[in-house]
Image (cartoon, rainbow, N blue to C red):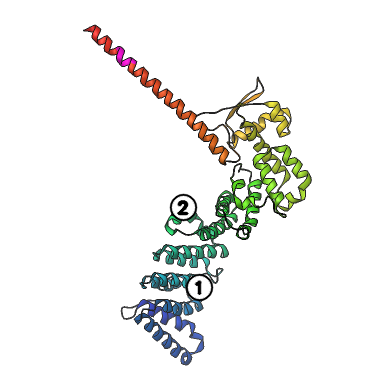
Amino acid sequence: MTTVVPTSEEDPALAVVRFTSELAWDDAGLEVAEPQVTRLCIEAQECMVTNKWLELASLMLASADLIFSKVSEKDLECIFTVICNLVTKSESSDEKIEMAKVISGKIIQQPNDKPALRLKILFNLYNLLENPYGQFHVYMRALTLAFNGKVTEHIIPSFKKMDSFLQEWNIGISDRRELFLIISNILKEHKSLVKESFKFLVKYLATFSGEDAYTMSEAKEEAVRAIVEFVKAPDMFQCDLLDMPAVGQLEKDAKYALVYQLLKIFLTQRLDAYLEFHAANSTLLKSCGLVHEDCITKMRLMSLVDLASDDSGQIPYAVIRDTLGVNDDEVELWVVKAITVKLIDCKMDQMNQVVIVRCTLSSIRCTERVFGQHQWETLGTKLAAWRGNIANVISTIQANRITEDGSQAMQGLMIR
């Protein structure tokens, strides 16, 4: 196997041009190949002398692309390392970005051919770039390659650093929108990462605010998808979808109004409202891939949360039985289920047949299904009251300390 071994007499870039062009023209015969190789080497030298690095990158990529299946992965990595390194040669930021676009565009053209290697080359290119937008562009190409080439496991770990990436890239709304959506789609392919996929989908929907109706309409399908994923998820009981304009537009949409109504039922109403909705729209639920029995289970838990949010702090067993539509002997079972998934913090008083919802300083008494303006105001009121109570405690402690110190001083005088 021929290997690229740059010598001190020849620049690495020129060595790559010679190596790749010889392999590319190898089948044409020596008489045809030799002048073509010579021509390409001369063009490469002219580009290097005149600092036309973008032209050189395009020339090198043309030959390198033709030999992708002819050499080992080690040689390919070596070849593309030299090509990617050209971005460090240019003194123009715009040219560096354009080179990164040309190189990354060529690499992702055949995602099913050595996708892991192509992804590694893109990571190498990313690390060579200093311009934040250039880095963002290459990262987006890497996401596309990973998704199409089915090697997403190599790029998913990077999602944990997304907040720091966004600070570094400082990209606009449209770029963030595109980024969040493709990440959500990548995560959706992994059953164990459904929650993470939903989070990025919500981030995507949150980028739509104040746009015109035409732009907002772009988010309709994804808004529907977010609603269905929330309703379907057995371990998600809280979301802010109702507050988002991208979701709100569905309320009066001829095609998706019922989907919006379903979300509203799950976030603001109880089981009886869902059962009524299902009776009239069972076909819709099936078309969305929703299982009626699973929806009932989730709505029972959500209804129990709603009962627990009452300021009285107590829920009679009979109320739970009637609200959840269960038998007397199933009441405690559903309370235990809600406790297990950490929806409510409570204890059961079997003697008095009531559930006592606890409220401590270290924990909330139950999970709020919707956390909007009203919930923030309620939380603010509770925190203000708590702060007042703490202030009173501190004042009492200080007053007692003063009294104590005074008593000790008087005792001292008396002893003397």
Q: What stretch is highlighted in magenta?
A: 403-407
Q: Pick whichever of labels 1 and 2 is earlier in the sequence.
A: 1
Residue 395 place in picture, x, y as percent: 39, 22
Residue 284 place in picture, x, y as percent: 74, 51
Instruction: Work out whether residue 44 or residue 27 is closer to the camera in this orientation and state it.
Output: 44
Query: Which amino acid lies under the numbered mark 2 shown in the image of this protein?
Result: Asp
Q: Name the main secondary structure of what is drawn in magenta.
A: helix
Residue 5 place in picture, x, y as percent: 37, 76
Q: Does the magenta stretch include residue 232?
A: no
Q: In which quarter of the image is residue 75?
A: bottom left
Q: Tell me: residue 1, above or below residue 184.
A: below
Q: In which quarter of the image is residue 322?
A: top right
According to the picture, the residue beneath numbered tag 1 turns out to be: 106
Q: Is residue 404 magenta?
A: yes
Instruction: Work out whether residue 95 or residue 157 is closer to the camera in this orientation and state it.
Output: 95
Q: Can residue 283 be seen in this view?
A: yes
Q: Residue drawn 46% across and 53% down? A: 161
Q: Quadrant location of the C terminus?
A: top left
Rounded to the nearest angstrom, the CA distance separating label 1 from label 2 is: 29 Å
Circle 1 sits in a helix, a strand or a loop, which is it? helix
Q: Residue drawn 64% across and 41% down? A: 267
According to the picture, the residue beneath numbered tag 2 turns out to be: 163
Residue 67 place in picture, x, y as percent: 49, 78
